[in-house]
Image (cartoon, rainbow, N blue to C red):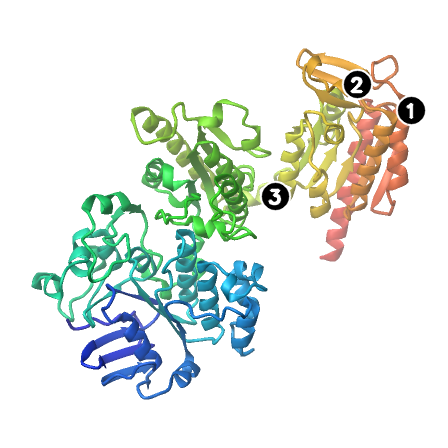
Amino acid sequence: MAERPLRPMGSSAPVLQLQGVNVFYGRSHALQGVDLSLYSGVLSVVGRNGMGKTTMCKAIMGLVRPTSGSIRFMGEELVGRSPAEIARMGIGYVPQGRRLWRSLTVDEHLRLVSTGKGNWTPERIYEVFPRLAERRRNGGGQLSGGEQQMLAISRALLMNPRLLIMDEPTEGLAPVIVAHVEETLVALAAEGDVSILVIEQNIGVATQMSDPVAIMVNGRIHRIIASQTLAADRDLQQRLLGVGRHSTDDTEASDTPGADAPLKRAEIVPLGPTRIYNANPVLPTRWSQDVPAARIEAAARTVSRPTLAAIDGRRVGDISPLAARAPQEPHVIIAGTLDTKGEELRYIRDIIKAAGLRTRLVDLSTAGRNQGADVSAQEVALASPLGSAGIASGDRGTAVAAMTEAFRAWTAKQQNVAGIISAGGSGGTAIATAGMQTLAVGVPKIMISTMAAGNVAAYVGPTDVTMMHSVTDIQGLNRLSRAVLGNAAHAMGAMARSWIEQNAPNPTRRAAAERPLVGMTMFGVTTACVQQVTKLIEKDWEPLVFHATGIGGRSMEKLIDSGLMQGVIDVSTTEICDMMMGGILPATEDRLGSIIRTRIPYVGSVGALDMVNFGAPDTVPAHYRSRTLYPHNPQVTLMRTTVEENRRMGRWIGEKLNLMEGQVRFLLPEGGVSALDAPGHPFWDPQADAALFGAIIETVRATANRQIIRLPHHINDPAFASALAQHFRALHQSRTRGASGRS
């Protein structure tokens, strides 16, 4: 069949062009008039064993000499040149079998090949393949198959090639490593610096990497076909690539388009989810038996997007990696384990798309197979500093933990997210909500889960995740699950549309005078103070009051890190008590960390540092039961902190204050730190308070910006509230004058 060249719009000369190439091994005619052109990006060549694919690679590299025909690279003839000369011209070769030196370490392999010139250096290799960086001192014989393939690819890249030829790059690799190799090669081609010719027997890999695909039969390029047409047509695979058949049965005349027949994308690219069949679940040979249809059906998968090499109907070489991977339009993320919840998640996706919203389907599976998502599990895994190592460990617990951290890191880097929704069991819920918690408060977040009927604190965290109970297990679509999932999808669609409208550029709204936000912390025993401060500042500021229950402080600090707060009046730092003494409403070690990072104006105090929170009386730890306890209600028991505990807390707070480089005022109410810490009340203990105040004063390094202010008032006295408000206003007036002077 005559070749139909892969000629993208605007391309003039091919990177690689074979014309009428014939190669003989003795009397065996291995290549029979091969015609093939590669202009840019990735081109996959598929075919059974013994069809001449490796011989074609060797002919290009000068390892075998054609009897006739022409092989041109960037317009220059290669036939007759030595392999070394061809390599120096800019062609990298990754041979079948990897061909590494067992005695050389990874780093020695790379340094041996590196020229020190061009874009590719060992350092860049380690960035692209973090696993090689971890194994840099291991010998070639100590690497896994996937690591060896990464090293073989890296060795070729260090030659800074213009063309990369790869012979069976995924042979014998685990599925998760196959996905990594796929995406790495497509990303390289997308950068535009290198074109790639890939020889493959795995149809799934070939159609993911390249669009279209060249099919080799008996030493000839039999046809060039659209990837999705090949991937979705089981019968066509059998006719062209099926095992146990001869070339006379490969195809019928009506299947062969003319040499000049246009490839109409509307006719060959199916819309919506596509069922992908692989006629070769086991690498075939010419003598293999036909694969049973039931086995092919069982191994089929559903793909809901174009191939990696043809995103939005354009070849990957014609678009930038940023455009391919990071939608510039607001979009909704549908995330979950597609290997077990694919049908349900795609149902949610389709409802949201029908509402006119852009979507991204993100796979959080740990099984390693490519599930046809917009963002594969492998791409998510690569966001983690550990890469795919934990996910490919084989241990489910380790894999779920690794994917949780990876999705957290991946989500934190995303832009223009108008909402995120997921559905899953315990593992999927843990993974998905970890990512949700990295998004700013206000971005819609819905988790449909069997776990929503229990304690959801770990899943919700410090942000506004909405948990919806799935009622039944999420296991297929039925009358009930369609109703629950549909309600969640419609709710997400409405919330995402509202978010987009609120966050769209609007000069009128932007110009409108809005009060800046100030974060405040309150506990029951400091309520009077916070209410008074709120009245004093609410004309010019919009207070957001957070209940200091552990999660309240974390929520406030998340908003500070998000840049939504312009200041803080941290009246109630009581969560530090529970953190240090083992109470049930603890802060984390990062309490006050957002103030340190953002340097926003901070006015703080020691509200309710006199108490540690426990549950019902019988839940108080045995070693605390002789202490001063106060039953706040039948479910909450408070314990008075001691002199030594207050001294420890004072030092901890003082060290945090020393790290703050913004404007800081920390006020000490010497008349008592809570409603219970006053003369005649259960927690009145002047010695304990004095230990707290003294430790803070001794620890803090006072400066013009960082000051400790002692006041003779009780924390709930109007005079103390007035002092908090006055110092807060003074800090902002000083900051405003400083900003005006700089401008």
User: Marks 1 and 2, how far apart in space?
Assistant: 17 Å
Residue 462 in percent (x, y) is at 60, 34
The residue that disc 1 covers is 687
Determine which of the numbered discs, if any, sits on residue 118 in the image.
none
Query: Which one is nearer the viewer's eye here, 294 or 71?
Result: 294
Could you say which disc has been placed on residue 675 in the image? 2
The kind of secondary structure element at disc 3 is loop
Location of residue 248 in the rendering, given as x and y in whole percent from the top left corner: 10, 65
- Where does the image place residue 497, in percent across and percent down from the top left? 42, 39
Label 1 vs 2, first from the N-terminus: 2
Q: Classify residue 80 by image quadrant.
A: bottom left
Q: Is residue 544 shown above or below 2?
A: above
Residue 273 seen in the current view: no
Task: Identify the mark nearer the N-term, 3 or 1.
Answer: 3
Q: Secondary structure at mark 2?
A: loop
Q: How many marks?
A: 3
Q: Image point 61% across, 39% down: which residue?
A: 514
- Disc ID at residue 562: 3
Q: Is residue 476 above or below residue 66?
A: above
Do callouts 3 and 1 mark residues in contact (Cβ within 8 Å)?
no
